[in-house]
Image (cartoon, rainbow, N blue to C red):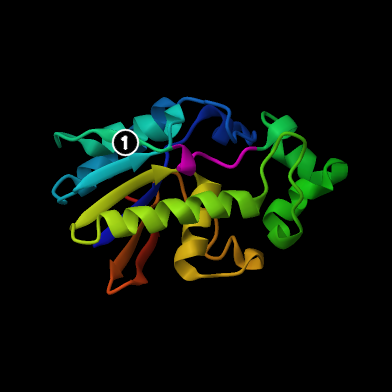
Amino acid sequence: MELYIVRHGKTEWNGNGRIQGWSDIELTDEGRAAARKTAEALKDLHIDAIYASPLKRAYETACILRGKREMPVIKDERIKEVGFGVLEGADVSKIRSGQHGQFTDFFDAPEKYQAPEGGESLEAVSERAGDFIREISEKHKNDTRIMIVAHGAVNKAMMRYIRRSELKDYWKGGLQNNCGVTVVDYSDGAYHIVEENRVFY
């Protein structure tokens, strides 16, 4: 069975360098166009199920990627983005310059990252993402291909589970591009990364 793990299309906040987290920001026209090109590239793939974060930017991306396939897009709260609490909406470049040192750790030293007020730790998102992957892998082990459409940080949490990596290696491979596609094979109880962060636009 293959997992197709996809990041949502571009949003206005992506373009402006603002932290999104649980904020429910919609796709831009550019983001929708990239999703449509990705959908065209993947249109002939057999897919048994599609799961998406409930946040609009991921759910709409998943609906575009579904194309003409007659199946629901299943929302799952466990794969929504990391929550950033009071930092949501902030300019990333400004808060990485020293005003909020803990956000610098988010990318540069994830093992030291301390969630801001109202936010979520990387350990917490890793736990829910790992629980999701475990459940999906078992539920669909006899299927051909499952698509999962979510977000940059939570997708890395899924990959952390798949790789069995430590928290310090959270960002191994880099941040996934908008509409980037990562393919993972799951067979005989083991994961194998086939391709990582491929773009079709």
Say which residue appears at 15% left-offset and 37% top-offset: 69
Q: Is 98 displayed left or right of 164 in the figure?
A: right
Q: How many marks?
A: 1
> Residue 35 at x, y = what percent?
33, 38
The answer to whether residue 35 is above or below residue 185 is above
- Kindly tell me whether residue 20 is visible in this rendering: yes
Q: Which image quadrant: the N terminus?
A: bottom left
> Residue 115 at x, y = what percent?
73, 45
Q: Which residues are magenta?
A: 77-83
Q: Say which of 131 and 144 sits in front.
A: 131
The answer to whether residue 141 is above or below residue 187 is above
- Kindly tell me whether residue 198 is visible in this rendering: no
Q: Which image quadrant: the C terminus?
A: top left
Q: Count neighbours of disc 1 (C-alpha within 10 A) and say few if under 14, some if 14 to 19, many if 20 or more.
A: some
Say which residue appears at 21% left-offset and 42% top-offset: 40
> Residue 44 at x, y = what percent?
13, 48
Q: Residue furthest right?
A: 99
Q: Is 2 displayed left or right of 52 in the figure?
A: left
Q: Say which of 197 and 23 sits in front.
A: 23
Q: Secondary structure at mark 1?
A: strand
The quadrant holding residue 18 is top right
Say which residue appears at 22% left-offset and 55% top-offset: 145
Query: In the image, is residue 173 part of the stretch drawn in magenta?
Result: no
Q: Amino acid at mark 1?
A: Ile
* Residue with the mark numbered 1: 74
The quadrant holding residue 29 is top left
The answer to whether residue 108 is above or below residue 43 is below
Q: Say which of 58 and 124 sits in front.
A: 124
